[in-house]
Amino acid sequence: SWSRLYSSLQWEAMDEYELPEMLRSPLEELCLEVAQLEIGAPRTFLREVISPPSADVIDHAVELLHNLGAVTDGTGARLTPLGQKLARLMVHPMLGKMLLLAGLFRCFQPVMTICAALGYKSPFLCPMGKEKEANAAKKELSDGSESDLVALSNAYNGWCRGRARFANQNFLSHQTMDFIHRLRQDLQSVARDMLSEVPEDHTDPVYLMEVCKAVVVAGMFPKLASIRRWGKGETMEGLKIMVHPGSVNATKSDCVVAFYDIQESSQRFLYDTTVVSMAPCLLFAPELVELNRTSHRVVFQLGGWEVAVAPEVADNLKALRTDIDEFISRSVGHRPTEVHMAATDALSRLFSQSAGGTLEGNDDDEEDEAGTPRGV
């Protein structure tokens, strides 16, 4: 035990009671539980509690669940079949969706590691004075994937082989890795009870990596950012951001990244980033609005972005989006058939290819040397 002394000024400035957890924690899991219990819309139910959270916070949580496909409409009162499965998992709904889709798209093992780690904390260490060495070790673990999450999965695989020795050589916390390992075992037990059968992961490491990235987009949408130059850019909502210096993507330019968290200190930093292609972004977006069509290109509204694609790609994309949500709802958690496997493999091949999408620049965007707004 230990004691600490406070000055009278510090004592007077302290709150009499700590804020209730409901007022200082994300509400997505709570709103999912309210919908599962069928006791009304979360906004209506939660305003009756002793210390109700603000309506804006509740609305943000319900909007995220709706974007994930977990609730049927903007009220958040009823779960979809996917939402019913997410409610049974012991992780944040974003991670839960990633896990369920990973079983469908044959990247279950790496995504299970990613979900366990993101549900706890990062095992990567950055000792003072050894930042370059630590960042180089993390980049080596990413194996050219341009993904902090793939680096995390590879780090876990290496730790399983070498334990503490591997951790010490690669600037990893052995204790954190051990806890992630136990969380992963618990998560695997719950997931396997829910999923009738998990097919074997893809054997091609490059193919496996690209499918993992697509599943990350599906779970984290709309947490996407356009990186313009040297790790700086904007989120889909227009927030100015910078990729954290400890990321493998800290110096990236002209790309789109999915991210898990934003934290603000000296800058507004993105954490746990993954460079992704436009194909899964366009396929998994909850809403895609066609704004303009010419003989050469079609422009879609994707959240706060405008994305241009070739007309033939646009037509195929719209047809595929019509069926993909229903296919996922019917397939997740059920024993995979030959038809399901063929369909998911075809989608996986699409994820590993570029959809030809170009992110349109705003009028005030910087231009590249050719005078054209930078695209993706």
Image (tube, rainbow, N blue to C red):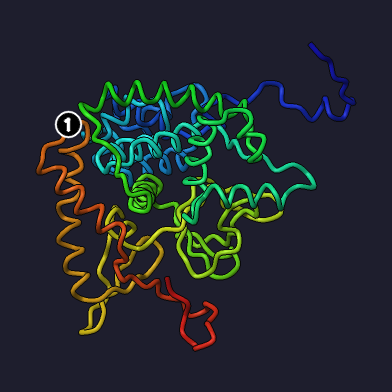
x, y percentage for residue 50? 50, 21
Quadrant housing residue 346: bottom left
Q: Tell me: 347 left or right of 63.
A: left
At label 1, the amino acid type is His
Q: Is residue 159 above or below residue 244?
A: above
x, y percentage for residue 77? 28, 33
Q: Nearer the viewer, residue 50 or 375?
A: 375
Circle 1: is it few (<14), some (14-19), or many (20+) Cα within 10 Å? some
Tag 1 residue: 334
Q: Nearer the viewer, residue 184 or 6?
A: 184
Residue drawn at (59%, 57%), measured in percent from left and top?
243
Quadrant location of the C terminus in the rendered image: bottom left
Q: Is residue 148 above or below residue 110?
A: below
x, y percentage for residue 290? 25, 69
Residue drawn at (33%, 49%), measured in percent from left and top?
204
Quadrant location of the N terminus in the rendered image: top right
